[in-house]
Amino acid sequence: MGKLNNYLKGKKEILKTFSVKGYKSWTAREGFGASTTLYKDGKKIGKCIDYGNGGEVALIEITLKNESSVKSFLDTLPKYKFNDYWKGQYDEEWDGLGKSKLESWRIHTFAHVMLEEAEEEAQLKKLCKTKLVVRVEGQKNLGVFEAEWPKGTSDQLMLMSRLTKQLQPKVITEFINKRFA
């Protein structure tokens, strides 16, 4: 993996500090809407929601104290260039205006990151029901194999050992299926 830009550094700090549960999605007027519940230190602090109407992702059902705490946290994160955000989302350069303008982390950007994390977890959970999914060191994309995650611990260890040997010299850094076992 290459050097993390300030957007990715901020995103990493956010995901270390906050978590999400209960992803829901639906068809909306402007595409799809989605929501998830937001947690800090294991305690529910609010919800992130994309109403699917073309607007920004919002933070709702949050007390002023918790919102103030989130804003204070966001103020500690490094400012990032819009191009860094764009590359983080679409894996390509932004060629429009404001490419190098420094952006501060805002509530809607934070809510977007958290909703995106919840969507990714929901997709991984669904994929892990029928496939073996691993993260390989140095590769951006996950490895997906036509094998199911075994129920028994000894079978899991045997499969992990066999796959690790098959992929050498590459190193498996995570068996994603273990998250949802």
Image: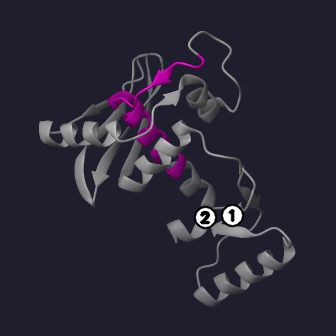
In the image, residue 131 above or below residue 166: above
In the image, residue 19 above or below residue 181: above
Percent position (x, y) of residue 129?
A: 60, 62
Of residue 150 and residue 160, the one placed in the foreground of this image is: 160
Q: Residue lying farthest bottom?
A: 154
Identify the colour scheme used. one colour
Note whether residue 53 is visible.
yes
Q: Is residue 95 left or right of residue 72?
A: right
Counting residues from the start of the chain, the first of labels 1 and 2 encountered is 1
Majority secondary structure in the magenta region: helix
**Chain part drawn in magenta:** 99-121
Of residue 164 and residue 152, the one placed in the foreground of this image is: 164
Percent position (x, y) of residue 78?
A: 45, 38
- Amino acid on which the number 2 mark rests in the picture: Ile
In the image, residue 160 above or below residue 128: below
Disc 2 residue crowd, few under 14, some 14–19, many 20+, Cα 10 Å:
many
Q: Between marks 1 and 2, how big is the CA–CA gap?
A: 5 Å
Helix, strand, or loop for circle 1?
strand
Residue in the picture at 75% in, 83% down: 161
Q: Is residue 154 left or right of residue 13?
A: right
Residue in the picture at 59% in, 86% down: 153
- Amino acid on which the number 1 mark rests in the picture: Val
Percent position (x, y) of residue 170?
A: 82, 67
Report which quarter residue 112 is drawn in: top left
In the image, residue 98 above or below residue 62: above
- Residue at image mark 2: 176
Q: Do the residues under discs 1 and 2 have CB atoms within 8 angstroms?
A: yes
Percent position (x, y) of residue 140?
A: 71, 49
Q: Which mark is residue 134?
A: 1
Helix, strand, or loop for circle 2?
loop
Of residue 100 and residue 130, the one placed in the foreground of this image is: 100
Residue in the picture at 52% in, 36% down: 7
